[in-house]
Amino acid sequence: MAKKHSDRGDGRDAKGRWTKDTSGNLKGRPTSVPDLDMADLINFSRFPTEITISGEKQLMTRHEIVWFKVFESALKGRITAQKYLIEKIEQAQMSREYLEFYLDKWADRLSDDPASVPREVVFMMETIMASRGPRYSKIRTRKGGKQKRS
């Protein structure tokens, strides 16, 4: 039976290269993992998948399923999931407070010059107002009590 690598006694083959068993890196150079493209990741996370929850089949995106599992493991007592959720909830609360702080400024600009307010800001303002309850469901401005609808 022929040897795959002929060893010259010091752990190297005839050409002076380390043999696989003696280099100290038994698995060799690790294979490189290609970076994920963010567009691929977003498309993958938006893919709807059927999941069974409490015996009922529901259609959810993969992103929603991951969040569901994180909440589920936190409720079962997994400390790392609980810490992660607390951190994310606090970040979301701070973001919301920041947006609400500037809500009046944007409302004034919306009443004066609607074209100067980005669409994303109008969307966030509507979302904040809708989450406050039905009496705040429309964007209110200070001038004359008029309501601005978009």
Image (tube, grey):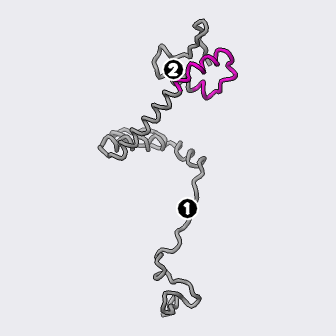
Q: Position of residue 79 (x, y in %)?
A: 32, 45
Q: Is residue 27 above or below residue 111?
A: below
Q: How many numbered callouts?
A: 2
Residue pictured at 42% horizontal, 38% vertical: 58
Question: How many residues crowd around disc 1 within 10 Å: few (fewer than 14), some, or many (20 or more)?
Answer: few
Residue pictured at 69% horizontal, 18% vertical: 113
Residue 142 is left or right of residue 75, and the answer is right
Residue pointed to by mark 1 = 33
Quarter of the image where the C terminus is located: top right
Q: Position of residue 10 (x, y in %)?
A: 49, 89
Residue pictured at 43% horizontal, 35% vertical: 90
Q: Which mark is residue 138?
A: none
109 magenta-colored: yes
- Mark 1 touching mark 2, by CB under 8 A? no
Circle 2: element type: helix
Q: Nearer the viewer, residue 50 or 115?
A: 115
Q: Earlier in the sequence, mark 1 or mark 2?
A: 1
Query: For residue 117, which quarter of the picture?
Result: top right
Which SS does the magenta portion mostly show?
A: helix
Residue pictured at 36% horizontal, 38% vertical: 56
Residue pointed to by mark 2 = 129
Q: Is residue 65 above or below residue 118?
A: below
Range covered by the magenta-colored residues: 99-123
Amino acid type, label 2: Met
Residue 84 is left or right of residue 103, and the answer is left
CA gap, disc 1 to disc 2?
45 Å
Q: Is residue 123 above or below residue 42?
A: above
73 magenta-colored: no
Amino acid type, label 1: Val
Residue 81 is left or right of residue 130, and the answer is left
Q: Position of residue 73 (x, y in %)?
A: 34, 44
